[in-house]
Image (cartoon, grey):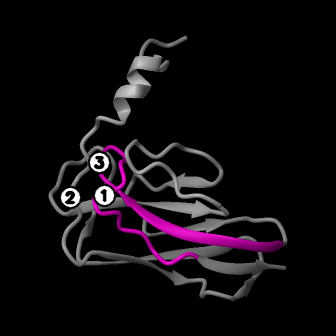
Amino acid sequence: MVAGLLLSASMLASAADIPRTAAPEGAEVYIISPKDGETVTSPFKVQFGLKGMGVAPAGVDVPETGHHHLLIDLKDQPAMNAPLPVSDNIRHFGKGQTETEINLPPGQHTLQLLMGDKGHMPLNPSVESKKITINVK
């Protein structure tokens, strides 16, 4: 194993002690497209919108910025007191991307955006979009 890739139980426990970055007052994130209730064909483009703050890549410490995380088909919100994990349901856009193309199987899906700070921690208070529902044919 490469040194530094394994997290001990004490390191995971201390993740809850990581301070959250304050969100700029009035910051809003939203999904430009697709629209809530829209029927799409995979692959499709998801465009991210943001007001009241800027976008910066992960690891870059610039005040009043963050980067996008796309939550796909999450039933429960991720923990807000720890860095967001990487999974098929929590996609990171740590290079500062403001859109992506995704491929989902046919059926109904939910999409939501959540802003994270330089270390993938949700901002405080969280800056998250309305959850939308789309249909993939």
Three-letter amino acid code at the position of disc 2: Ala
Q: Is residue 86 above or below residue 5?
A: below
Task: Classify 10 Å Cα crowding around label 2: few (below 14), some (14-19), many (20 and above).
Answer: some
Position of 25 with respect to 88 (left or right) is: left
- The one nearer the camera, 98 or 64, is 64
Cα separation between marks 2 and 1: 6 Å
Provide the residue designation for mark 3: 118
Q: Is residue 86 above or below residue 42?
A: above
Question: In the displayed image of the protein, which residue is found farthest to the left?
Answer: 63
Provide the residue designation for mark 2: 22
Q: Secondary structure at mark 2?
A: loop
Residue shown at 39% from the left, 53% from the top: 95
Quarter where residue 114 is shown: bottom left
Mark with earlier residue (2, 3): 2
- Return the x and y of residue 2 as percentages of the image width and height: 49, 13
Is disc 2 in contact with disc 1, using a CB cutoff of under 8 Å? yes
Magenta stretch: includes residue 110:
yes
Q: Secondary structure at mark 1?
A: loop
Mark with earlier residue (2, 1): 2
Magenta stretch: includes residue 87:
no
- Return the x and y of residue 127 as percentages of the image width and height: 35, 67
- Return the x and y of residue 89 as percentages of the image width and height: 63, 54
Q: Taken as a whole, is the magenta stretch helix, strand or loop? A: loop
Three-letter amino acid code at the position of disc 3: Lys
- Give the numbered dot on residue 87: none
Three-letter amino acid code at the position of disc 1: Leu
Provide the residue designation for mark 1: 123
Classify the position of the C terminus by image quarter: bottom right
**Residues shaded magenta:** 107-131
